[in-house]
Amino acid sequence: EDVVNGEARSLLRFKPAVAPITLGIMPLMKNNADHLAKAKGLARKCRQKGYNVFYDESGSIGRRYRRMDEIGTPFCCCIDFQTLEDDTVTIRWRDDPLRENERMKIDEIVGFLDIQCAHDA
């Protein structure tokens, strides 16, 4: 367990190279067809490169992050309204939840995972 902003959270801390799921992919709005298409496209691209990813559109974004923390997923990305404008996603690091979320181009996600998994191998 960990405490963030006064709230306890359960989590596993797998290194990215050995985590059962490397990336959680979450569209911000499950009723927005454009968000869903971008998220499913990213999931497909990551799986084709050999990464285990988990696509999740159920519940609030905070609850989805918590579910990923509980199973040890080191990174999550959120497809939001800005994604539709500039093709970037928000990246959340499990081990540093107070870190300011960074934005990354969708086309850079696989390379980011390659670096993170090689770094911690």
Image (cartoon, rainbow, N blue to C red):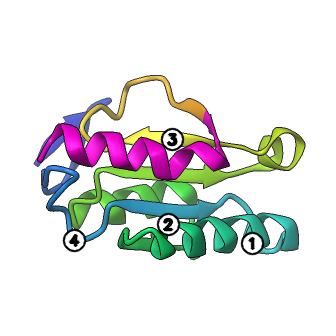
Element type at marker 2?
helix
Seen in the picture, residue 105 relative to 71 is either above or below; the reply is above
Q: Which residues are magenta?
A: 104-121
Q: Amino acid at mark 4?
A: Pro
- At label 1, counting other C-alpha atoms closer than 10 Å, the crowd grade (few under 14, some 14-19, many 20 or more) is many
Task: Mark 3 or mark 4: name the one nearer the start of the chain.
Answer: 4
Q: What residue is shown at x 78% (from left), y 45% (from top)?
A: 87
Task: Mark 3 or mark 2: name the one nearer the start of the chain.
Answer: 2
CA gap, disc 3 to disc 2? 15 Å
- At label 3, counting other C-alpha atoms closer than 10 Å, the crowd grade (few under 14, some 14-19, many 20 or more) is many
Task: Mark 1 or mark 4: name the one nearer the start of the chain.
Answer: 4
Task: Mark 2 or mark 1: name the one nearer the start of the chain.
Answer: 1
- Viewed as shown, does residue 17 lie left or right of 97? left
Give the number of the disc on residue 20.
4
Labels 2 and 4 touching (C-beta < 8 A): no
CA gap, disc 3 to disc 4? 18 Å
Percent x, y for residue 26?
Answer: 58, 63
Percent x, y for residue 2?
Answer: 15, 41
> From the viewer's perspective, is the residue at label 2 or at label 1 nearer?
2
Q: Which residue is mark 2?
A: 46
> From the viewer's perspective, is the residue at label 2 or at label 4 nearer?
2
Q: How many numbered marks have been drawn onto this rendered protein structure?
A: 4
Element type at marker 1?
helix
Helix, strand or loop: magenta stretch:
helix
Q: Which residue is mark 3?
A: 91
Percent x, y for residue 118?
Answer: 22, 44
Q: Amino acid at mark 1?
A: Leu
Q: What residue is shown at x 13% (from left), y 57% (from top)?
A: 12
Q: Which residue is mark 1?
A: 36
Percent x, y for residue 78?
Answer: 60, 52
CA gap, disc 2 to disc 1? 15 Å
- At label 4, counting other C-alpha atoms closer than 10 Å, the crowd grade (few under 14, some 14-19, many 20 or more) is some
